[in-house]
Image (tube, rainbow, N blue to C red):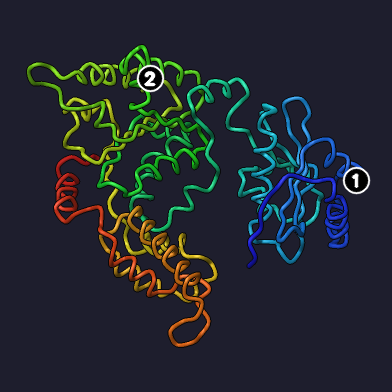
Amino acid sequence: MAHFRIRDFHPDDIDSILHLWEEMRSSQTEPVYSLPEVLASCQQDHAVVAVIDDVVIGAAVGRAAHNQGWIVFLSTAPQHQRQGVGGRLLAALEKRMAPLGLSKLSVLLPDSTVPVDAFSEQGFETKQNLRYLERRIPVQRNELNALTELGGRILPRGLWESIGGMQKEKELLERRLVMPLANSDLADQFGVVPPSAVVLFGPPGTGKTTFARAIASRLEWSFVEVFPSRLAADPAGLAGALRETFAKIADLEHAVVFIDEVEEIAVQRGGEPPSAMQGVTNELLKIIPTFRDQPNRLLVCATNFIRSLDSAFLRHGRFDYVIPIGLPDPAARESIWARYIPAQSLGEVDLSALVERTEGFSPADIEYAARKASQSALEKALFSPVSPDGSAPASGPRTEDYLEAINSTRATVSAEVAQAFLEDIEGIARL
């Protein structure tokens, strides 16, 4: 399958839009909006197209009315349907219209057998019997300024689904965090209090940040990452800057707040003289209960060294769960490898051999080895135009390139660290 890209509509695309519109009619699906309306919106409102080698294979057109957006046209060439083009077009169009401060994005479809998969995948919901679909924009205009000031953002949909393997961790996070937060009314009926704070712990490079981002994507909540190292330069000092940051976060309607390497600001207190960081730890311990009193919030703290955290930091009442995130299992390693191997090489590479040889590797280790193999293969192709046996050079990395890279890659997580992690699961984890 050829790769496509999304770009803004150009005036030269008019003929392609006309062709897509006519194809829709020839498939016995009468468009809701007339051709002049679609063409006018292409030029005056908002439009994006999907292209392969500069050939337009799909288009999405939208217009805004007050605080509501409307999808005027969405079409993909028949030979490229069910390849994810429609969903990507809708996501790009929504991003294009985001600065308008829309609260809702809607579409009217003809009363026929029009596929709605692309709309459903992007969060649109069918309304009544008219096949009226709408999608609520997760961040409203009045939140955009606060979110921008915090350096936060709305992450793209689909990050949760893109995590391959790690099914045990995914299911645990889905059940404990995502489900109660996404269905708060139903949770309340069962007496379940949605979580407000969680600690993810595990060896370096195991994907704790990836899971935090995926949770925000899954919930469609704002994602704000707090960087203690940046706050330390604030004139108010680290403790004061931390307090001010969480005060601004209170202005958001929904938010996943992420602090990586939280051990930097939640160190064990004690000793003489007291450490300069003890005041910061005290401030954070005061912030968390206030944060927990605000609905539609989730604080995710990640640490590689959970034993270094202050004992009061992890007690019940501050964090609902303390969840281990370990090294990727075989299914996860296969998914990670597949992500970094070029499409033209994927069918020729022995994935099972790579999975077997990288037991104990973190996702970051696998990414490093994959990129190293690609670089080595490129250099061979450029500087050795003819293979030793006289055949043409490979068109991409081969299994032996990856195995060589694996052999020269040192795993981040040592056997001692892995064993300590297992002990921490027994003694510290709270699931």
* Residue 138, image quadrant: top right
| Residue 371 x %, y % | 42, 59
Give the total number of marks visible in the rendering.
2
In the orientation shown, which residue stands out farthest toward the right?
36
Instruction: Indicate which disc, 1 or 2, sits on the residue closer to the N terminus.
Output: 1
Q: Nearer the viewer, residue 166 or 41?
A: 41
* Mark number, residue 110: none
Q: Nearer the viewer, residue 80 or 430?
A: 80
In the orientation shown, which residue stands out farthest toward the left?
272
**Local SS, label 2:** loop
Q: Which residue is tagged 2?
A: 293
Looking at the rendered image, the quarter that the C terminus falls into is: top left
Residue type (three-letter) at the residue carrying disc 1 = Ser
User: Taking 297 as reference, is 72 above or below it?
Assistant: below
Which dot, 1 or 2, sits closer to the camera?
A: 1
User: Taking 270 as reference, is 205 above or below it?
Assistant: below
Q: Which residue is tagged 1?
A: 34
Horizontal placement of 190 versus 414: left or right? Answer: right
| Residue 193 x %, y % | 37, 30
Residue positioned 40% across, 19% down in the render: 246
